[in-house]
Amino acid sequence: MTTTSTTSHAINRALHAAVSTRPRPPRASPVSASLAFAWRALLKIKHVPEQLADAIMIPVLFTVMFTYLFGGAVVGSTGEYLQFLLPGTMVFAVLLITVYAGVNLKTDITTGVVDRFRSMPIWRPALIVGGLISDAGRNLLAAGLVLALGLVMGFRPEGGAFGALLAVALVLAFAFGLSWVWATLGLLLRTPSAISAVSFLVQFPLTFASNVFVDPQTMPGWLRTVVEANPVSLLVDAVRGLMHGTAEPEQIGGVLLAAVLLVAIFGPLTMRLYRTRT
Amino acid sequence: MSTDPVHGDLAIEATGLVKIFGAHRAVDGLDLTVPAGGVFGFLGPNGAGKTTTVRVLATLLQPDAGTAQVLGHDVVREADRVRDRISLTGQFATIDEELTAFENLTILARLLGFTRAHARTRAEELLDGFGLTEAAGTTVKTHSGGMRRRLDIAASIIVTPDLLFLDEPTTGLDPRSRNQVWSIVRALVSEGTTVLLTTQYLDEADRLADRIAVIDRGRIIAAGTPAQLKASVGAGTVQVQVLDPDRRAEAARLLTDALGVAVQTGADDGLLSARVDDPARASLALTDLTRAGIDLTTFALGQPSLDEAFLTLTGHHTQASSDARKKAT
């Protein structure tokens, strides 16, 4: 009896101590608020590592499967095909997982945790920017895996290590721009799975009707026109060019411009929706 | 910059607030005045507009009409200044289930501008004060409802707010957890925070609140101190279950005479209920019934339920209870 009341007194004292200290630090800067959200995303991955399954499985599966499945048929040798295919699978794998930008945002909104963030005095875009920082980590993991696996399987970038790194950086830059599209959809669509569904519906035709797997030279004229105008093809051309040291400045400039445009359009749109729709 | 509210200031002043979702007027011309300090009980059934009102006041929703000042700042034009001084604990837990209690608090502290070291000490201090130290390192998923609720409130007071919105903090909690939440609310108030607490339970509002407003269909239908409110509803009800349904009419007559109020006959065969303002008259009624030889299976004196309060204040039952009634028939 005495012990219970002693403990309850102790708890009461601790309770009053906790609520009576009224610390009021200066507001977090946009950078530190964004980094805190990125840290939050990393901690979530630590507790639920399954979240990374896609970022690991898709690169591994695509690189290995497509190389050995199509290699013989398309160019007669898997080694030669890998030289052509790898930049494409890197683009394919990374673009597919960019959808997490929207899925994670929608999941936060569905669980109500965003309500708390929105009632706090923090820089508004921090939640989304922080999410994109951790997404960039996820994209880097996927791109790195494709490259590492490719090197093991015999891929040799003719543009050297520097070219390969630039290629990865270009993929990440475009992925960052594209992520804002998913963030916008994350605020527009009703469920996280709806975003994944839209992503597959859009990305599969765009990827297969591109130059990821085959050289458009072999295609009938009308299809070739479509494939060469496909933005995925333009991205793959630039990445392939960097990997093999044949990239034209305007190819790279085009991709970077596209990334900037995506951010310029979908960034403000996302923030507007975030303010008004949730 | 901002000063703490002195006594007599208003924590909330809302005029003609309207929030419409499609065709549904969730908040429909709501006027609300909440003085600074103490607990303000915001009472109403499910769907009455409590949560929508709280969301407007906490800057999460923009009103379609009307104005609201929170701690002297307009919730639309000065939302940022409002957010500096309020905190919201939503009806559904707004913490990350996949993370541990400690991680949840440190992340929020970092977002509020605490240094890494200070965030850790503040998290530990709160976990200690809320009796959550043992659960600090486990993911919230594994916590009980009461623990989550406490963590949720702890998360809201990392920077102790001047005004805390608690949206149905005890709904679904067992009595022990409910008491813990009540102690937290009392401790906060004693340290100077104003608490706006929404609830469906009249007894909760009665025990905690200094002032109460009753909301129905998006409007305030009654406001005052708990004593004033109860006086308008009746101090309580007496419920009588007659063993022999044939003698119900006779029992009703005796009760009417003894209590001096109208007696309602319940849906159940032998059930009678009546408002009583004075418990002494209820005991007189019991004596009369016994003397008349009417056997009773129940004679209970209770606080008016929210539904009874509603019936008195609005002339209609709460939505939840009419739904239950429809289901029962």
Image (cartoon, coloured by chain):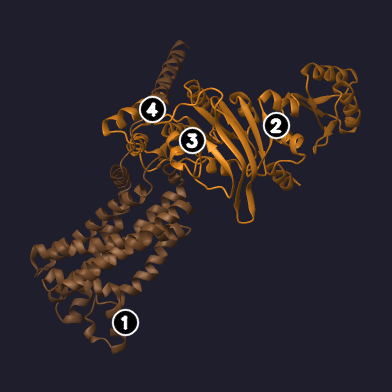
**Label 3's element?**
helix
The image quadrant of residue A82 is bottom left
- Judging by the rendered image, the residue that carries numbered circle 1 is A226
Residue A190 in percent (x, y) is at: 48, 58
Identified by mark 2, the residue type is Ser
Left or right, B194 with reference to B305 = left
Residue at the location (48% across, 44% down)?
A: B77
User: Callout 1: residue from which chain?
Assistant: A
Residue at the location (25% across, 58% down)?
A: A139
- Label located before the other in sequence (4 or 3): 4
Residue A84 in percent (x, y) is at: 17, 74
Where B62 falls versus A19 (above or below)?
below
**Nearest to viewer (mark 4 / mark 2):** 4
Neighbour tally class for label 3: few under 14, some 14-19, many 20 plus, Cα within 10 Å: some
Identified by mark 1, the residue type is Val
Is residue B303 among what the camera can see? Answer: no
Apparent colour of chain B: orange
- Judging by the rendered image, the residue that carries numbered circle 3 is B145
Neighbour tally class for label 2: few under 14, some 14-19, many 20 plus, Cα within 10 Å: some
- Judging by the rendered image, the residue that carries numbered circle 4 is B126
Residue A71 in percent (x, y) is at: 19, 77
**Nearest to viewer (mark 1 / mark 3):** 1
- Judging by the rendered image, the residue that carries numbered circle 2 is B305
